Every structure is written in C-alpha cells, then in structure tokens.
Image: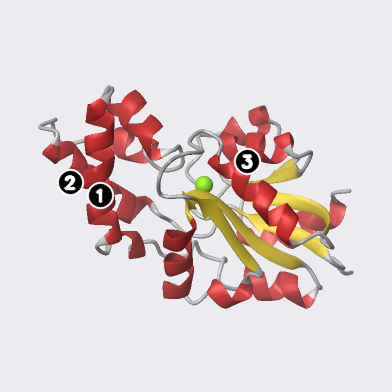
C-alpha cells in the first residue's frame, strides 16, 4: 500500500498539537487586562480553533476597539512563550514519518501566523517532517479566510501533490477544505464537540492519529 505523491495538509492547533494550555494562559491574561471575570473552562475551550478576533467577540462579548486591545494583550503573552505550551497529541509524533514512508507529501495549513506555527513545530521536533508551513499574516488582513488562504498557498506550493486531503479538528477546517474541493479527514482526537466534524461535511472522522493512514487509503 502506498500514498504515492499524495499531498496531506494538516491543521496545527488541535490537530497536530494540543494548543489549549498556551491559548488558555494567553486568554486569561487578555481577559484580565480587559477587566472581565476569570474565564470559565468552557470559555477557554471555545478559544481553541476560531480566529482570535471572533473568539473574543463571540465568547467574551467584546466589540470594536476592545477586540483589538484583547488581541494585543493575548499576542504579547503568547509570543513571549505561552505558544510553546502546546504538546503534540498522543500518536502525532509517529504519524508524519509513517506517511512519508508511504511517499506522501506533508504540509501544514493553519489559521495561525506562519511564523508562530514554525516555532511550535520546531519546538516539538516536527518541523523537518513538513515540506511547507502555510499560515496567516499577523496583520489579520485575511481574517475569516485564513485557513482557506493557507490551504491555497499549500496547494500552490506543491503542484505535484496528488489527491490533496486536509486533516483538521474543527468545522472551519472542513469548510476551508471544501472551498478547494478537498476532502477532509476529521481529527476526532481534537476539541470539537461530538458530531461537529461529520455535520460540517468531513469525509471521515477518525478517533486517533494512528487511524489516519487507513482513512487516507480508502479516500478517492
Ligand atoms: Mg484546529
């Protein structure tokens, strides 16, 4: 069995790494800065995945300039080191080498700024496994479309990649894949509520990274 030249795109946060600790710490700092009460566990969970601006607006009810102030406070904490508090999910460290042994090409497509993604991947020793890391820019110019743009960049960078597929843990990953006509493998080990990925249109949802190779083998 081989995945000859197959291009497999991976979302970062929640899929490759458990970003919740660093995101939670940065969210707490930002929320305190805005004079809001200590976030609940549910509020902290809701900050993993969506664009930051949306998280502060919908989860904490901020609007206008307050969203920008919260994002600045968050990013200061995150860039100062909280971002590296993102261990790989169990089973992830073994997965890239396994897929590459079957001749798949791997790339990262994330709604996170690419420079942050590179630092996180390097920190956990996975950076060298990926042929490219594609993300957003820090200015937020393509907000709401970050993953769509990152996936487009990944596809353009690997024109020889066949039957590209995206592995992602939230509904917006599935939507970002579908915009490009890609099938999405739902990372059921991530933080999405049960049923979210299937409802969004994931071709298949797997429970562990170890199930990804078999899922790839049966997708067109
Ligand atoms: Mg994610």
- Badge 2 element: helix
From the viewer's perspective, is residue 159 above or below residue 147? below
Nearest the viewer among 156 and 75 is 156
From the top left corner, tell me how far across and down residue 205 is, in percent.
68, 43
**Residue 44 lies in what quarter of the image?**
top left
Residue 102 vertical position relative to residue 207 in the rendered view, above or below: below
**Label 3 C-beta lies within 8 Å of the nearest ligand 1 atom:** no
Q: Residue at x 66, y 70 (%)?
A: 131
Distance, label 1 to label 3, CA atoms, is 25 Å
The residue located at (58%, 77%) in the rendering is: 128
Label 3: which residue?
Answer: 148
Residue 93 position in % (x across, y down): 55, 72
Measure how far apart labels 2 and 3 are at the Cα level: 29 Å
Q: Which residue is mark 1?
A: 26
Marks 2, 3: nearer the viewer: 3
Residue at left offset 23%, top offset 54%: 77
Quarter of the image containing the N terminus? bottom right
């Amino acid at each position: 069995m081989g995945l000859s030249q197959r291009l497999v795109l991976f979302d970062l946060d929640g899929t490759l790494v458990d970003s919740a600790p660093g995101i939670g710490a940065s969210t707490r700092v930002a929320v305190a800065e805005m004079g809001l009460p200590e976030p609940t566990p549910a509020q902290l969970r809701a900050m993993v995945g969506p664009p930051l601006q949306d998280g502060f607006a919908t989860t904490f009810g901020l609007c206008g300039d307050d969203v920008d102030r919260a994002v600045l406070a968050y990013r200061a904490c995150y860039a100062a080191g909280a971002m590296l508090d993102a261990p790989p999910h169990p089973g992830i460290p073994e997965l890239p080498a396994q897929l590459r042994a079957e001749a798949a090409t791997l790339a990262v497509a994330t709604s996170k700024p690419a420079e942050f993604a590179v630092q996180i991947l390097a920190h956990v020793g996975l950076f060298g496994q990926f042929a490219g890391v594609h993300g957003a820019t820090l200015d937020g110019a393509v907000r709401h479309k970050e993953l769509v743009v990152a996936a487009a960049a990944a596809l353009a960078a690997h024109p020889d990649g066949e039957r590209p597929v995206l592995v992602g843990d939230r509904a917006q990953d599935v939507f970002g894949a579908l915009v490009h006509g890609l099938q999405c493998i739902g990372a059921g080990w991530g933080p999405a509520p049960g049923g979210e990925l299937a409802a969004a249109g994931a071709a298949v949802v797997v429970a562990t990274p170890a199930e990804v190779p078999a899922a790839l083998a049966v997708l067109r």
